[in-house]
Image (spheres, rainbow, N blue to C red):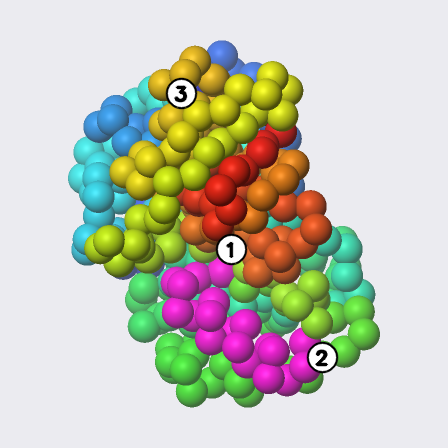
Amino acid sequence: MLNAIVDGLWREGDKSLAVRLVAENGEALPAWQPGAHIDVHLPCGVVRQYSLTGDFREESYLICVGREAASRGGSRYVHETLRPGQRLSISAPRNLFPLHQAERVLLLAAGIGITPLYAMALHLKAIGTPFTLHYYVRSRESAAFARELSQCADCIIHTTSPRTTLAEHLPAPEAGLHAWVCGPAGFMEKARDLAAAKGWDDAHIHSEAFQPVAPPAAGDAGEIFTVKLASTGERWPVPADKTIAQVLQENGVDVPLSCEMGICGACLTPVIDGVVDHRDSVQSDTEKSAANQQVALCCSRSHSGELVIAL
């Protein structure tokens, strides 16, 4: 954990609040790359994941928090209670949405999904990689970083619905072209469906959303199964009303947890044997069907009677 101080707060559009964080000891915060996020431990008792944005070469961190009407505590606290000078505990950056090298880049953002893609756009512009950013918002007034983006000809802010214009902005696949997509779940699903229909290779379209997958329907929590530790051979039953992480913790196994909703990747653990019932929104479909799989201990379950994990 890192000790940080809120160095500044300001509005970004009419729905978001930018927060500048500096190290309490005055030193530079750990380095990061576009696509990274941090866990922010808020004094109200919740932990939230926020993408780092802005110029990654800065010694401070910049996050941008959208105001959510159905906030479970994090967004409301940041917008209503957080103040300059306040101390916060944060994690070191983790990057589950990295910007890989590509000949050309397409960035597709909606709503607060602009935060990681704004950092990517700044980096791509600095290194001279050709790119185009399409940013979809309900109104010009709600756009974050609108002033900065308007100064770049490659960044286009749209107030039209992506449902009607996304197909036009997503070109046919080309060698060397990669796309990064971030925003609400429906937006990203639409982008992936369009990309698949146009023949995009799944490995060339990258997405991230800090939103939990829909909870299982009542009575569909899953059958009981056994989790086994590969290192010791210890095994315990996982009932339908408990997660793998809860069972491991009850038996003295240290589990790295953060969001506990399958959206941050902190508890992803390699699987040695068994068939995972994936319920996280961190991994792509390709990763979930790969030969070497990982299980989100906080939410996923097992289709097989036993799941052997690398702990």
Q: Report the Cα–Cα distance between label 2 and label 3.
A: 46 Å
Identify residue for label 2.
173
Amino acid identity at mark 1? Glu
Q: Are marks 2 and 1 in contact (CB under 8 Å)?
A: no
The label shown at residue 208 is 1
Amino acid identity at mark 2? Pro
Q: Are marks 2 and 3 in contact (CB under 8 Å)?
A: no
Front residue of this view, candidates 165 and 255: 255
Residue 93's x, y, as percent? Answer: 55, 33
Residue 248 in view, yes or no: yes
Q: Nearer the viewer, mark 2 or mark 3?
A: 3
Image-based side of 71 in relation to 287, left or right: left
- Give the SS element for disc 3: helix
Identify residue for label 3.
249
x 51%, y 55%: residue: 208
Magenta span has 193? yes
Task: Examine the rendered structure and indicate whether residue 194 appears above or below residue 192.
Answer: below
Bounds of the magenta span?
182-200
- Give the SS element for disc 1: strand
Amino acid identity at mark 3? Gln
Residue 40's x, y, as percent? Answer: 39, 31
x 36%, y 23%: residue: 88
Front residue of this view, candidates 114 and 71: 71
Q: Which badge, 1 or 3, comes first in the chain's sequence?
A: 1
